[in-house]
Image: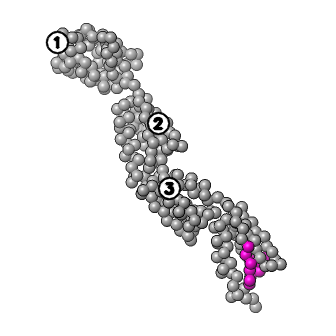
Amino acid sequence: LLYKKIGGKKDSISISIDFKDIDLNDLLDILSAMTGLNIIASPEVQGRVPVARFENVPVLKALEIILEFFDYEYEIVDNIIRVSPIPLVSQSFTLKSALASEIESSLKPLLSEVGKIELNQETNSLLITDKPKRMKEIAASILKLDEPDRQLSTQSFSLKFIQAEAIFPLIQPHLSRLGKIEADLSTNSLLITDTNYSLSKIEKVILSLDHFKAQEKLFSLKFALASEVAKLISGYLTPEGDLEVREDKNEILVKASSYSLEKIDHLLAELDIPSKQMKK
């Protein structure tokens, strides 16, 4: 073991050492004895150093390299060098395109043995705590996963009560810059392409709009019998809907959603004509 002083200060001493598979605390004791530096390690500091080979290297630089392998650091306080684990850092990541709940599983393998992730679905964010070096890798991975192009999906929304053409303009403001929407009037549905996070928000908007809002409409029949047509109309009603047959005036009062009323309109336009009601 060789060391020599450069200048007159202990912390400027250069050392030459060559160890293999040595206990970290034993190595710290050796460095302290070699240089006269007061090196104190916290109880958490432990491990074995596979190789410690330095040739004429400043002792503090050698110490930094040795500790970096274990995610430890040193601090000089009142001529005492205190060695301890590098403190964990916490950072919150709010996602704009991806769903935090979906990428959480992709990030877990990147955590160290002491790292953890906390999910906040309400804000679509992840609070991650880990070692600083791991945090850089995790942050880069999140940035990549949250790219809008990587998170585009297409989802179909079948509407039960409201008409697709009526809800169409109400959904457009909620689309991201990459989003697009198509209305299929034949199935009363919306086909929406957007990022997964935008789709999750749009789904909530649709659910808030597509609820039963009763409207009443009186259908006066000219050729078909109200009592017979009422049986067919019942099939177009949701459980919330209702109808009343007025046989004396050959009318049907229907209480239903706008979408159901539109379908009933089309049905009666086809049925309540002379050619369909002629009987021999």
Above or below: residue 150 compared with residue 33: below
Q: Quadrant of the C terminus?
A: bottom right
Farthest residue, direction right: 248
Amino acid at the residue labelled 1: Gly
- Helix, strand or loop at disc 1? loop
Question: Residue at label 2?
Answer: 127
Residue under the image location 19 percent in, 16 percent down: 14
Looking at the image, residue 80 sits to the left or right of residue 230; the answer is: left
Above or below: residue 225 compared with residue 64: below
Distance of mark 1 from mark 2, alpha carbons? 48 Å
Residue under the image location 77 percent in, 80 percent down: 225
Q: Earlier in the sequence, mark 1 or mark 2?
A: 1
**Span of residues in magenta:** 218-229
Q: Earlier in the sequence, mark 3 or mark 1?
A: 1
Residue under the image location 32 percent in, 19 percent down: 74
Residue under the image location 52 percent in, 52 percent down: 200
Front label number (2 vs 3): 3
Residue 49 in the image, given as x and y percentages of width and height: 29, 21
In the rendered structure, are the residues bearing label 1 and label 2 in contact, judged by CB atoms less than 8 Å apart? no
Amino acid at the residue labelled 3: His
Question: Residue at label 1?
Answer: 7
Alpha-carbon neighbours of circle 2 within 10 Å: few (<14), some, or many (≥20)?
Answer: some
Distance of mark 2 from mark 3, alpha carbons? 26 Å
Question: Residue at label 3?
Answer: 174
**Which quadrant holds residue 177?**
bottom left
